[in-house]
Structures are given as C-alpha cells and as structure tokens.
Image (cartoon, rainbow, N blue to C red):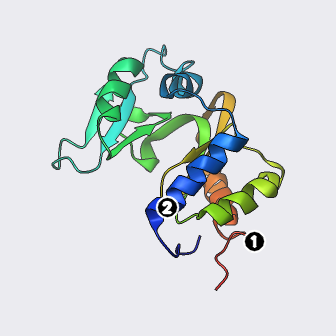
Amino acid sequence: MGRMAGNPWQDAKRKTEYLQAMYESISPEGFYDDILGHIEDEPDFQLCAMHAQAKKGRRMRRYDDVMDMLLDAGARRDAYVYPAAYYHSYALEALLQSTSCLYIDLDHVAAKQLRRLCDADFFGHRPTYLVNSGNGVHLVYVLQEPVQTYDWAKRLLKRIHRALVNYPRLKSRT
C-alpha cells in the first residue's frame, strides 16, 4: 500500500466511521472467542501475545485464559495476539504449527483505499472480520477448523498476502 497523505488521525477516524456505517461491530471477547475458542481447549495449545515495546526477554507472554490475555493486552498499545498454535509456544514462523484464521495485515491503507477494497468486495473473498488498525487494516478470514501450517501452506499465505498488497486498484495514485 502507498503512503497516506494528510492527517493520519483524521484518516483513521474516517475509516472507523465508514466501517461502523457499513459493518456490524463485534466485541473483542467475541472476536477472540471466534478465532481462538475452538483451539483454546487443546492440551498443548497456549495463547501467545507479543508486547513489542517490552524489554528483550519479556516480549512474549503466554496465557492459559483468553480473558486474562485480553485484559493484559487490552491495556497496551504494543500488544499483538497470535491466532495460532506454535511448537514450544514460541511465536516464530518456523515454529508455526496451526492457524485458525488467515490474518492479513495491510499497512498504509487510507480511507479512500479502504472504500475501494470494500467496493471490490475483497476480490471475491470477503473476510470474516475487517479490523481498522489505525494506519492500515487487518483482513481476518476465520477457518472452520485449524489448519496445519506445513511449508507449502506458509508459501501460499505469503503469495496471497503479496497479491493483495500489490493489487493495482489499491496502490496509491500519485
């Protein structure tokens, strides 16, 4: 996606207003229950959240309960919750074991670009959830059941992400 011109706070507000007018809202608890609810009870699964601004060695937090994670992560602006299971409960791509959704983070998406994305109906693949991240958007495609993330699946996800990021109608027009 291209760089946004103008005031980023105003643009984020316009995106929020547009999304509220066009789509039904969901609570954070409902969102994470939909994404993590069916894998939370797996014996080897542990919820992971990254606190990006924490001191090295304290960035990755593991939780046994979704509500504990949401309360802790919700009080921070630097928390990233992983909707996946990792070998040894450590969030590294190489250790990704399974995912319960496709989570595509598109950075630098202005309100006008968001409208184009929605008008294009997400190129025939409408996400389960569309999240305004302020500077961009997150497209969340919830899967009916977790998918094992073998190397071929990781490559496929990267190709899907690259295709969305490089879609001509979404690139900034300069």
In the rendered structure, which amino acid carries the disc numbered 1? Arg
Residue 152: x and y in percent read 64, 50
The answer to which image quadrant residue 71 occupies is top left
Task: Work out how far the residue at label 1 is from the one at label 2, CA to CA, in angstroms.
Answer: 22 Å
Residue 138, can we see it? Answer: no
Q: Residue 169, labelled with which disc? A: 1
Residue 31: x and y in percent read 55, 28
Along the horizontal axis of the image, is 11 left or right of 92? right
Q: Residues within 10 Å of mark 2 (few under 14, many from 20)?
A: few
Instruction: Check the picture and name the quadrant holding the N terminus.
Output: bottom right
- The residue under label 2 is 10
Element type where label 1 sits in the image:
loop
Instruction: Check the picture and name the quadrant holding the C terminus.
Output: bottom right
Q: Is residue 72 above or below residue 92?
A: above
Element type where label 2 sits in the image:
helix
Residue at 64% x, 66% y is 165
